[in-house]
Amino acid sequence: MASDTVHEVVEMTGHLIDSWILPRAWDIIMDRGGNFVVEEMRVGISKTETSYIRLKIVAPNDEILERILSELQQFGAVLTHANDVRTAAVEQDGVLPAKFYATSNLPTQVRLHGQWVDVEGVEMDVAIIIDQENGRAYCKPMHEVRIGNEVVIGHDGIRVIPFERGREREAFAFMQSSVSSEKAKVLAIHEIARQMKETRARHGKILFVLGPAVIHTGAGRDVAELLRQGYVQVIFGGNAIVTHDVESALYGTSLGVDLQSGEQVEGGHRNHLRAINAIRAVGSLEKAVEMGLLHDGIIYEALKHNIPLVLAGSIRDDGPMPGVISDMIEAQRRMRQEVQGVEMAIMVASMLHAIATGNLLPARVRTVVVDINPAVVTKLADRGSFQAAGLVTDAELFLRELVEALAE
Amino acid sequence: MASDTVHEVVEMTGHLIDSWILPRAWDIIMDRGGNFVVEEMRVGISKTETSYIRLKIVAPNDEILERILSELQQFGAVLTHANDVRTAAVEQDGVLPAKFYATSNLPTQVRLHGQWVDVEGVEMDVAIIIDQENGRAYCKPMHEVRIGNEVVIGHDGIRVIPFERGREREAFAFMQSSVSSEKAKVLAIHEIARQMKETRARHGKILFVLGPAVIHTGAGRDVAELLRQGYVQVIFGGNAIVTHDVESALYGTSLGVDLQSGEQVEGGHRNHLRAINAIRAVGSLEKAVEMGLLHDGIIYEALKHNIPLVLAGSIRDDGPMPGVISDMIEAQRRMRQEVQGVEMAIMVASMLHAIATGNLLPARVRTVVVDINPAVVTKLADRGSFQAAGLVTDAELFLRELVEALAE
Amino acid sequence: MASDTVHEVVEMTGHLIDSWILPRAWDIIMDRGGNFVVEEMRVGISKTETSYIRLKIVAPNDEILERILSELQQFGAVLTHANDVRTAAVEQDGVLPAKFYATSNLPTQVRLHGQWVDVEGVEMDVAIIIDQENGRAYCKPMHEVRIGNEVVIGHDGIRVIPFERGREREAFAFMQSSVSSEKAKVLAIHEIARQMKETRARHGKILFVLGPAVIHTGAGRDVAELLRQGYVQVIFGGNAIVTHDVESALYGTSLGVDLQSGEQVEGGHRNHLRAINAIRAVGSLEKAVEMGLLHDGIIYEALKHNIPLVLAGSIRDDGPMPGVISDMIEAQRRMRQEVQGVEMAIMVASMLHAIATGNLLPARVRTVVVDINPAVVTKLADRGSFQAAGLVTDAELFLRELVEALAE
Amino acid sequence: MASDTVHEVVEMTGHLIDSWILPRAWDIIMDRGGNFVVEEMRVGISKTETSYIRLKIVAPNDEILERILSELQQFGAVLTHANDVRTAAVEQDGVLPAKFYATSNLPTQVRLHGQWVDVEGVEMDVAIIIDQENGRAYCKPMHEVRIGNEVVIGHDGIRVIPFERGREREAFAFMQSSVSSEKAKVLAIHEIARQMKETRARHGKILFVLGPAVIHTGAGRDVAELLRQGYVQVIFGGNAIVTHDVESALYGTSLGVDLQSGEQVEGGHRNHLRAINAIRAVGSLEKAVEMGLLHDGIIYEALKHNIPLVLAGSIRDDGPMPGVISDMIEAQRRMRQEVQGVEMAIMVASMLHAIATGNLLPARVRTVVVDINPAVVTKLADRGSFQAAGLVTDAELFLRELVEALAE
């Protein structure tokens, strides 16, 4: 080893082979311009045994070594020299120290006084704050950090628990990265239904992220049914879905199309403006339900069953409908709150809200992305370290089939 | 009117306003560089009355006048000077006279000895042959014309019956050009089912054009069910669908994916080669059914119920499977034969075969195009003079819902 | 005419035939369940002459008559009985009177004391406020109306100037509704360049709406060139484009991909977080330019040339970058301000911002929508009353060709 | 190891780590229900060193063991017990022995009398014929095998040379599986140009597969330029591209759209029928060039430079144009002939012909797939063992940029 190189030794443990962790690690080392020596390796013989490897990573300079270590951490590599996590203090509100550590969406631990401590509220691309006093570590987005917060920097004392694909016949196994429209979806829908039943049985939390096409296609009644049956614990959406749901409940149309006959009942899209205006006149969606003005649809069922709704606005909105949050930072804050404890996320015919939600979800949440546009499904479901299944299919027929499968 | 212009007078009768025929006609005249004078116009007052217009078309030269007349004929315009149709004789096999008239897919008449005669076997882009002896007119594709055939040329004595959109609440009305994935499809599927029932009740002929995704998605069983229930009178497809249908019947897989579990049961795509080889070994699909080798699936049901299958090959085929026609001219000839009398055409998850079929169908055939790719649906359903409804949706869920709707 | 029907007489003047106004009007009347009698009609003979028609509209009840009139107004129909516009006062902040008139994006006039007055600031789906004192009429979105505002209701005294497609060989004529990827785009790009040159020559205002793919594909340099050459007067975008533009200027990457070599230079997307953090540390984009930290790219050129930037946030944003507006109502307000006077709008690789901008633009603005996804182009360009041309093509190659065409 | 299992020992050598061969092999073993013991393993330390592994594969029964071995062979695994290849004789023309070995598109060797012999003419999904007399092995598609042919069966004595991704900064490396429309394409186009120059310099063979959109978009002139500059050695296409190329040369239109002005010059698509008819009248494309009738365009340049054209028909064709092969088996035979020796394949805006060609190409051919539809690019470029780069971009702008890049 040339004297002008730098190196570091890391250890990895787990299903390194099954989960393709090892080859991806080797790939990264070499792609970034480094090299490695296998110091020790034990391959788990049977499917349940884990493997162990100790690698010496060699790089031409510190910057490259740092990059490699940073990426290997996502696969669970831990530095053998076992220091505590390092931090720097925030010196300006909303600004991180230069060498801040950015999280992945994987379970993460930091080493405090020689002890590995779980990082709370993990999501993608945020900072880790250390609360030395209470021996806690938790996530904070950049704009929320305040002067004096101790922010994790560098790579020492950080351990990421990589996402290990189950080898056993697993629920989501056959769907993963199967975004093709040419695969059998009825099978997949029944599998999703089975998992929803299990989740409901153990009082788990299921999140639905819904786009307005759910209403336009007449599938609002299917979501309402899911709400009545207790399969929805929280809903994320935008101004459009709530507006068209109310329009549908008040006037029987969605974007001016009659949901019974499929015909355009009136020119323009005026009904959606009338729907917004009607709710603004009474003050809130809750008030509209209370007064009996709104007595049908997704919003009605959600409010009746006390299901939290996070309705986040966007610049293309008319109105907006009361209840829609127009400040994005506030909307994200509310979404962050409500994703806590979510076990399954079903995202249907939404792009903006689905991507936003995907950014906030920890990797362990089982996520189903349904869209007729393969680009949306690919964008959301095709992440290496994310437990997502994508279905390129019709939102309406998916929801209809799902309701049927849950009834079996 | 300047002395250096040419002109011609045409008459049009029908639902000129409802069907947008008049404005499209005016548009064409001006787009092509002509002008017009309304010589007489009677607008039908009520919905059932027809309108009448006599237009003098003015153009700067004969070539432009000819173009305009050629296009107006598609909207039913007839020259007032009422000559008989003109013809020229074919002088070389498979070659048309220079000024040959190319058909549209609309009902067409020609004037023979002062009488309007229906043109038989109308389809898009072919020539009209006059059989003077028997007073008949019929269509022939270019490559089939033979020396001595009398081919219609120019524009005299030709009358096209334009496609008139029904004003009354019509079966297909609400679906037309509604290729959006954001519309309610369950409504549309029930409407299609209603029309299929009507068609079956009057012993009408329903054509299915099927792509291989029907098998990959596990919807082969739904098509088999439609066959058993008498809703399919003829099937068009290619090497892929027959191969995967046989693969599915013989090995339970499609492209190597187990249709029960959704899992890859074997590497590569070898099963489809085995399926082809197995049928080649016994000699034909019919023989395979007879021997009990093939006892399940679309092909089995089709052969059992004596449903004609036209299986047309393509350059990407393996094998091919016995029964697949490898000569394209022969395949088209067989398709032309079998489209005679078809009243409805349901095209699912096929592009090549659906476009080929669309080219052969007269405008009056009610055509449903189902594909998850909006580009395919647009290409096929979005033709002004064609009675096509497009559904951007999932083939598997469409067929499943269709079977359910037919069972109601 | 039966005694139990209601009727109203309207007049229409203009290029009723060329612009398909008449048939669309007739269509609407009959689709909505009404009928009509042509009381007088004069068809313009030559291309430059306008046509005139007076129609008696008959409907079974007032509600249907109202709907028909409401839609016909979009085509320029004016009631012959010529009343002044009617208004009702706002009784609750942010809530419109029940029968409020919702605007289209077409030029609109209202009749005040017998005089036709132009409505200021017209955009789609907003209310018209009457300032009786000053004899003015102007648009306001629902949430901005205040108690006491006089809001236009019903249909009396309203005149919409319909969008008339030019008959002459017009700039945009050949592109309209030509969203196909199968058409020659080099021709269209040269036509767009010609119009941009004309617009610049008369000191007109060109708006660019940009998505982040502009940076990812390396086309940021082309937009920077357009800025240097004076072809951009205002930019709309979001957090992503500004973040990746800064990332590109600071680190040479976009989403971590080296824009010189096309290679992933670092794992994850950490550079975009670093870029945001770096600007947050200095306080603003303006400060970053001033300090010499930011010395390249779209934002740099825009700030240097005093081009207004409206950066609107969304719920999927990291950061956000300083300068990004996180309140949607404020963002819309700023966008409304900046679209005033815009003559051309070029929207590239953006969906959310392009739709939001499209909602705010009056119909007369020449709009070019460029996206590789046909669905986006269709959604934006395919509106009857909107002067939009859609190009289904590559953002990078479009901008590159545009810069070349402008240099000719 | 339980007594009721079966096992086999295989060896693998090469860039097992870099090329992800090892983990994929392990994956397959376990996915199929087997297990393995690493008997010996040597990891190449530096990038240029190869690795070696000897694995004992254990499976519950012979069928599973066979499947595993069959798949591992695609990664270069060779049975250690080193038998000669086994064969069975064809007993019926066009029918393979039941246990026939189906090829991949990778370089393959068979062991004859203890010697490893290269299999000639390798392509996907065909059989290997052994010519014992001459010690040769070559590929044959199923339908061409004849009684008495010795066909390879089972897995003994077969060695596949796996596709090893180059670790060094390789031409295609950065493009592989980068089908996104959001990546910089100008870089990729310049890289393709560089490789085309190299290929031309060493008199290598470049194949172009072209769809009709090349003509519709006006990019025919760019392909003509490539032909003049010697960058095209063979062309595959269909009836549509040749018809529209001739239409363009004869009438200046493509599907009736003027390629100079972008305007529809005539109703319907009659010009394409006229173009076909005109060539049928003179007898052949060659004759048309000779007579001076055809003096421009792709076909003209190809014939003038003696570039082989394989024009394969399909069932959707009008005409067909003389020179188009209407028998699919003959068309495939001609394509097989002409792909011999091809080093690069550029496939633009074609789906059917591109897939057909992809099936025939050995893995070593550098293939570039250009289409604006991501589904086409994914289908073609996204194969593990295939050296394909996909560009989701505009055919016209791609070809324009390519011509410019080649001129630098």
Image (tube, coloured by chain):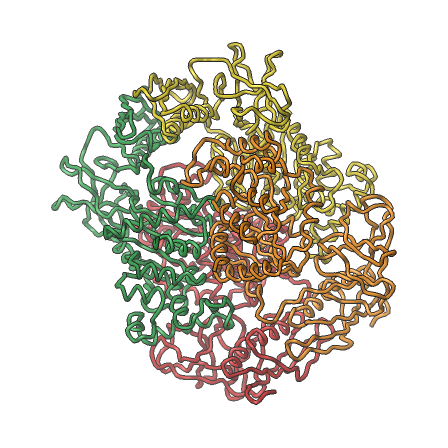
Chain colours: A green, B orange, C red, D yellow
Q: Could you tell me which quadrant the N terminus of chain C lies in? A: bottom right
Q: Quadrant of the rendered structure where residue D396 is?
A: top right
Image location of residue C193, percent across then percent down: 59, 55
Q: Residue at x 63, y 82 (%)?
A: C55
Quick one: D266 or A47, which is closer to the camera? A47
Left or right, B223 with respect to A7, comes to right
- Please say if A54 is above or below B39: above
Residues C372 and A372: in front is: A372
Residue B23 in picture, x, y percent from top left: 68, 69
**Left or right of residue B87, residue C175 in this image:** left
Q: Residue at x 80, y 44 (%)?
A: B94
Residue C320 in sight from this viewpoint: yes
Instruction: Tell me: residue A318, above or below residue D326.
Output: below
Residue shown at the point (33%, 29%) measured from the top left: A17
Does residue D368 appear to the left or right of A153 in the view shown? right
Instruction: Determine whether C44 is above or below B231 in the image.
Output: below
Q: Is residue C186 at least partly visible in the picture?
A: no
- In the displayed orientation, state which residue is furthest to the left: A133
User: Which residue is pictured at 33% across the width and 45% down the height?
Assistant: C274
Q: In which image quadrant can residue A216 be found?
A: bottom left
Q: Count the numbered circles shown.
A: 0
Task: Compare residues D390 and C112 and report the one nearer the observer.
Answer: D390
Measuring from the top left, give residue D54's x and y in whole percent. Answer: 37, 17
Q: Position of residue D113 (x, y in %)?
A: 53, 10
Q: Quarter-wise, where is residue B362 in the image?
A: bottom right
The answer to whether C249 is drawn above or below residue C165 in the figure is above
